[in-house]
Amino acid sequence: MTQFLINHFKLQQRINIGYILAGSVSVVIVILAAVAFSSISNDYRSYVSSSQKFHIDLLLTGQIIDIHRQAMIYTYQGHASAADQVMTGYENLLKQLDADLQVNPPKIQALLDTIRPHLKNYYAVFLQVKKQRDTQQYLIRNDFHHHASTIETLIRNLTIQFGQSSDVHWQFESILNRLLSAERNLYRYLDILDSSYVIAAKEQLNEAIAILENIGQQNHVQQNLIKEAIDGLERYRKSFNEVVQRTRGYLYLINVVMAAEAYEILYQSKKLSTFVAEEMTAREQAISAHVKEILWMLMVCCTALLVIMTLITDSIRRSIALPIVRLAHTFRALTEGSSQASIPDYPVNDEIGQLMHAATSFRKKNMETECLLQESMRLTHALESSHKTLEHTNEELEQVIHTVSHDLKSPLVTSMGFVSIMRKLADQGQYEQAVSRLDKITLSIARMEQLISDLLDFSRVGRIDLDYKRIDMNALLYQFAQTHEENLNRIGFTLRIHPNLPVIHGNESRILQLFENILTNAVKYALNEEQGAWLEIGAITHYDHFLIFCRDNGPGIEPAFQQKIFGLFYRLDNHAEGSGIGLAIVKKVMKIHGGDIWVESEPGQGACFWLRFPQPKTAEVS
């Protein structure tokens, strides 16, 4: 399919097909989702509607608990507003039950019919409680207080009648205290409903009556007044007992009868709640199964559509990406300068086809550029070679100028000085002394001749004898040792050549000149009377170069002079023979061979010259 799209549709057409396909699939998925969610929404609304119809159990439970709580508040605290709320709550709940009986299923109606009489009984008992409590309050505010005031007045009158008799006076005060304590215990009982206070109050009333009766038996004068006081105490006790009985009556009604009715309502409400929960669970399971079915169908349809869209869009993507990837590889090769990059076939003349034509032109330009680059590289190489030659020539010229201006000037000055002396001596007639100065002039001229000869030799290095070839250092140094064996034995100098020396690529005459100069320096400076002077030559092979070492047992070189000794005409000892150009030649020979030379030494511990030669290429060695 990918190749079919490449062969028959342009790039813009393929992109449009992808957009249209993605948009169509998205619209279909949205429509399917809308239908599915509409069905789920209908189920949800039906579920919500059913749950609202079945809210009666929660309403019953909440309202009956609230009504009973308000009834308890009225009973124990006597708030009239609490009684009003009980009545209002009862009326509202009864209306709600009547309304729910019209719209709920038969089973719920049966449960509501069972609850309704219990609710009415509960309310009827509450009215009795209210009546009992109102009567109790009336008794306390009227009869009880009236009897208490009356008996207190009688006791006060008796106290006056009996005069100051301390014993009787004390008994009357005791009666008043007992009456006050009984009244206090009654109020405590009404506050916390503890029967022990009632018992204590009755005992105190009985004691008060007994005291009065005892006073009456001992005093016959005030019998009528005492009898009246005893009758008042009896009425007071009767009123007290009635208040207690009324209180116990309405407490029984609310704690037993009303509580039983409330419990029965709650029990029936719990049954109703169980039934409603079962109904709602069944509805919920049915809705859940329906939702799962809808979601499963939606998922299957969407998955199928997405798979189809993925396959088609992947083919469109590949039909676009594959030519672009191939073209990218082609352009990457072309940008790297390749003139042989392959350009893939592309049958359609669209944007990618135009890029293919551009790649063809790019490859053609690369071929032209490659030819120009090769020519440029050839010219650059020639220019660099000329530049390096010019740099070497300039360096040599600077060194020659330095030598001419310094080292060659010294012999001339010396010769001119001796010529002046000879002229003076000749003028004075001292011809023999003047002639004796000719040797000094001859030595200065010979010194200047040696300097010029060494300088010429130094300038020739790198400009002539540039015939490079394969050099076996084992054979070369063996022949070198044989050549110098007689002279070295004569002066007592030992030359040691290690085996397994490398094969290098270079100019044989210059390499020999290099070792000649190193040996000359060693002979000149490495005289060791105790151990005997020696020079050993060996090699170490590295992965890309050879290291040849030349180690002697001479006096060593201080670190400050280890770089200077490779300069033109530099000598550590001005009294030693030579022009000081030998190591400069060695340095230059190593440079033209692409290598380097350095020295490692400590004063009194000899010196080791290291020669680094690059490993020759296979073609050079062969």
Image: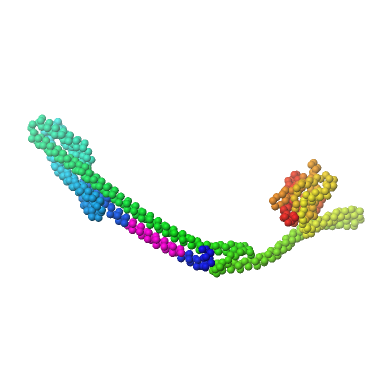
Report the number of discs.
0
Judge whether residue 220 can be spotted in this image: yes
Q: Which quarter of the image is occupied by the C terminus?
A: bottom right
- The one of 44 and 394 positioned closer to us in this rendering: 44
Q: Residue at x 64, y 65 (%)?
A: 339
| 302 in the magenta segment | no
Residue 492 spot, x, y in % from top left: 83, 44
- Residue 239 falls left or right of residue 479: left
- Residue 9 falls left or right of residue 422: left
Q: Residue at x 79, y 41 (%)?
A: 530
Residue 389 spot, x, y in % from top left: 74, 61
- The one of 334 and 308 positioned closer to us in this rendering: 308
- The one of 148 and 159 positioned closer to us in this rendering: 148
Q: Which residues are magenta?
A: 21-45
* Up-down relation of residue 532 to residue 613 (above or below): above
Q: How is the image coloured?
A: rainbow
Picture quadrant where residue 528 is located: top right
Residue 409 spot, x, y in % from top left: 80, 57
Q: Main secondary structure of the magenta part?
A: helix
| 33 in the magenta segment | yes
Residue 321 spot, x, y in % from top left: 53, 62
* Up-down relation of residue 29 to residue 127 (above or below): below
Judge whether residue 178 can be spotted in this image: no
